[in-house]
Amino acid sequence: MRILLVEDEPNMAANITQALGRQDMIVDNTPTIELAREAILAGVHDAVLLDRRLPDGDGLDLLPFIRKHLKGVPVIVLSALRARSEQIAGLEQGADDYLGKPFTTDEMLARLRAVLRRSAVIAPDVIRVGNLSFDTQSRQAAVNDELLPLPRREMLILEALIRRGGRAVTREGLVDAVFNFDDDIASNTLDAHISRLRKRLGELGATVEICTLRGVGHLLGSL
Ligand code: CA
């Protein structure tokens, strides 16, 4: 799960990024509308958290652009403009939810989970391939219903693969799912994570394999 956080206030951005990181989400923080537009065009995010008072304008002005380029991706406005009329304006312009500042990170996370559930991003609750299952709500994998604890990046790779339902995910697609724009990615980093994930799955007797299709990408299939 990768979140675009459009927020210019550094402390607020750091707190939210930390809270999302604890939920194993990848966060890209852009402090201006202009930088947010560039990030949106990458087409890699599953949800947007959008501040309103930004240095180069009102965050609400981004809503049509988000709708156009990130189809079906939910947007939550986070704003100190918390009057009822402001909230209605935000929802009418296409936000999925509107959270007045200040808010607790627990409330923000609950709202985010709610909009993700309603959007197409989270489809069935549990996806199964062979004896491997992945719960899209708790974002935990299990082999024969026994929990399979995974480091964050490996869980994100597995999540990206299993959500594709047997179709290939390109190498860029996996990088987008696992690293944010600021991460320094050595060319072999992704492969190292994939190889550790393969090993973990093998050790636990998962009846799945991660196939590498040269020039295409990777896919998860059952054995
Ligand atoms: Ca602001």
Image: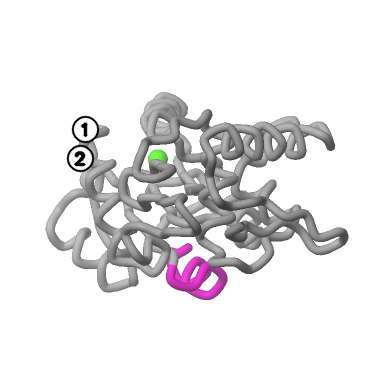
Q: Main secondary structure of the magenta part?
A: helix
User: In the image, what residue occupies the spot 39% across and 69% down?
Assistant: 120
The residue lying furthest to the right in this view is: 215
Q: Are marks 2 and 1 in contact (CB under 8 Å)?
A: yes
For label 2, the residue is: 107
Q: Amino acid at mark 2?
A: Glu
Left or right of 56 in this view: 48: left
* Residue 163 seen in the figure: yes
Give the crowd class for mark 2: few <14, some 14-19, many >=20 residues within 10 Å: few
Residue 157 % position (x, y)? 59, 45
Residue occupying the point 68% across, 64% down: 168
Residue 72 falls left or right of residue 170: left
Q: Which mark is residue 104?
A: 1
Q: CA distance from mark 2 to mark 1?
A: 5 Å
Q: As drawn, is 8 to the left or to the right of 38? A: left
Asked where in the image residue 61 lies, by quadrant, the reply is bottom left
Give the number of the disc on residue 203: none
Q: Which three-letter amino acid code belongs to the residue tagged 1?
A: Thr
What colouring does the structure picture have?
one colour
Q: Nearer the viewer, residue 154 or 57?
A: 154
- Horizontal and vertical percent position of residue 214: 86, 59
Report the span colored magenta.
61-72
Picture coordinates of residue 137, whole percent (x, y): 31, 50
Nearer to us in this view, 222 or 177: 222
Which image quadrant shows ligand 1? top left
Label 2 element class: helix
For the residue pair 122 and 222, the one nearer the viewer reads as 222
Q: Position of residue 35 (x, y in %)?
A: 62, 49
Dividing the image into 4 quarters, which one contains the C terminus?
bottom right
What secondary structure is marked by label 1?
loop
Instruction: Say if the magenta span includes residue 43.
Output: no
The answer to whether residue 60 is seen in the rendering is no
